[in-house]
Each structure stands twice: as structure tokens, then as C-alpha cells.
Image (cartoon, helix red, strand yellow):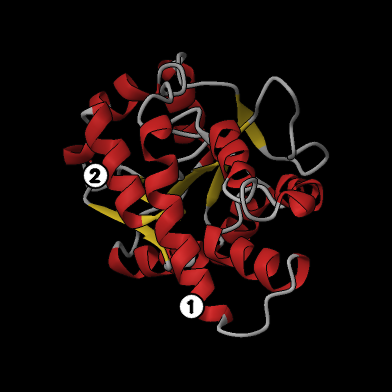
Amino acid sequence: MSDALPIFVFDKDGVIVESEPIKLRLFEELFAADHAEHVPAIRKYNRANIGMARRDKLEYVLGNLIGIREDLEREIDQYLDRSYHFVKAALLKAPPVAGVLPFIRESPHTKYVCSSALHAEVVDQLQALGIQDHFAEVYAFPDKKANVLLALKKLHPGKPIVFWGDTILDYNASQKAQVTFIGVRKPDGNPFLDLGVHTISDFEDSAALHAWITGETSV
């Protein structure tokens, strides 16, 4: 492996797997039995904060929308644990983003996953896709993406970092860490319009993607 190769860092939801719509729907269904009257407000907040760590969403939903005051931290932890089991089976059926599996398997770069999802959830999905061994490390909640990217820059001095994400939160993390960002856009919208961000819809044109990276990344 060439020492000059950039380091590749992938978000999970929406970048490796088409799981974001599933997670959005199931997060809302999580409250349907006990807090049905709050589901419309939960849905609005949930859809406005795509990419936010689930624990952070739960803190706002339980504390501000539902109005739990006593033992809020305990409630958050209980819902967080419940959510892992609630979404697991559906997430494992989520299809990979087109072309991403061969791209990951065939790219001779050191690769990482940097996700805001629960660590166990990320590992479950990578194992189901058969690609866990292609990553040097998996970073997930409670790791902050910008902090991870900054740490990877220190771990790999002199090598450019390329980070794939699908939300503005991912883009903001890349800006804070000052690493190259590639946005993965979806058919229903491109959150990176007017930001000058290079975007892709999938990983099927591997040659073009590698050519862009070679032309745009520098130490």
C-alpha cells in the first residue's frame, strides 16, 4: 500500500447503507404506544435533524416534547437501549448504497467508519454486509465526528483525509476538522446545494471517484 494514499472515512447511514429512512420511521414508531399524542411533533423534529445522534434526539424529545422532568437521564438510557433492539432487525435488511461494497473491498486505502449511530448497531450492520474487516477502526456514538477526524489527522500525519457523509452535520464536521468532504446525495434532495461540495449519488463509477480524489486531495 502506498504511503501517499489518502485515508478514507465513511459515515454509515446513507453512505454505506440505505438505512436513514428506516431509522427515521422506527424512531417515531418507538413512541407510538406510550406517547401517541406527541408523535406528530416528534416526527417534525426528527425529520429536521437527520444525522443527529440518537441520544441527543432522545434528550430533546423526552425532555422538551414529552416533558419528562424526573429521572430524565434514566429514561434516555432506557429508550436508547430499547431503540437498539427495536431497530436491529429492520436495519440489518437495509440494502447497501449502490457500488459501495466493491468500492470498499477493492480500494487499497486505510479505511475507517465514523458514525453517530450506536457502536453495536454499526458493527452489526458491517458484519451483516461482510465488510467489517476492511476497516482499521469503527468510531460511533458517543464519539463526535469532528473529534474523530481531527484524531485521524494526528494518527496519519502527512496524509489527506477523505470523509463521505450525507448530512449537513457531516459536512460541518469535515469543515471543523478541515478534511476533504464528499457528499452522498439522495433522489429526494441534495442538502449540499450552493456549498460547493462535490457530491455523488452512489459509488458505482469507482474510476471517476478515484480520479476526482487524486486530483483534489493534497497533503
- For the point 70% across and 49% down, the residue is 46
Give coordinates of residue 90: x percent, y percent. 42, 30
Q: Which residue is found at the position 58% from the left and 60% from the top?
A: 173
182 vs 60, nearest the viewer: 60
Mark 2 highlights which residue? 135
For the residue carrying disc 2, how many other residues have a C-alpha within 10 Å: few (<14), some (14-19), or many (20+)?
Answer: some
Query: Which of these two is toward me, 56 or 16?
Result: 56
The part of the image, by quadrant, that contains residue 186 is: top right
The answer to whether residue 70 is left or right of residue 190 is left
Q: Amino acid at mark 1?
A: Arg
Crowding near the residue tagged with mark 1, few <14, some 14–19, many ≥20 C-alpha atoms within 10 Å: few
Given residues 36 and 171, the one toward you in this image is 36
The correct choice, above or below, for 204 with respect to 16 in the image is: above
State the residue position of label 1. Answer: 74
Say if 92 sits above or below 140 in the image: above
Answer left or right for 93 relative to 102.
right
Q: Amino acid at mark 2?
A: Phe
The residue depicted at 53 percent of the width and 72 percent of the height is 75
Q: In the image, what residue occupies the spot 80% across and 47% down?
A: 44
Q: Residue furthest front?
A: 34
Q: Quadrant of the C terminus?
A: bottom left
Query: Helix, strand or loop at disc 2?
Result: loop
Task: Tell me residue 163's x, y (percent).
Answer: 48, 47
Considering the numbered disc 1 on the image, is that residue within a helix, a strand or a loop?
helix
The answer, for residue 49, to whether it is visible in the render is yes
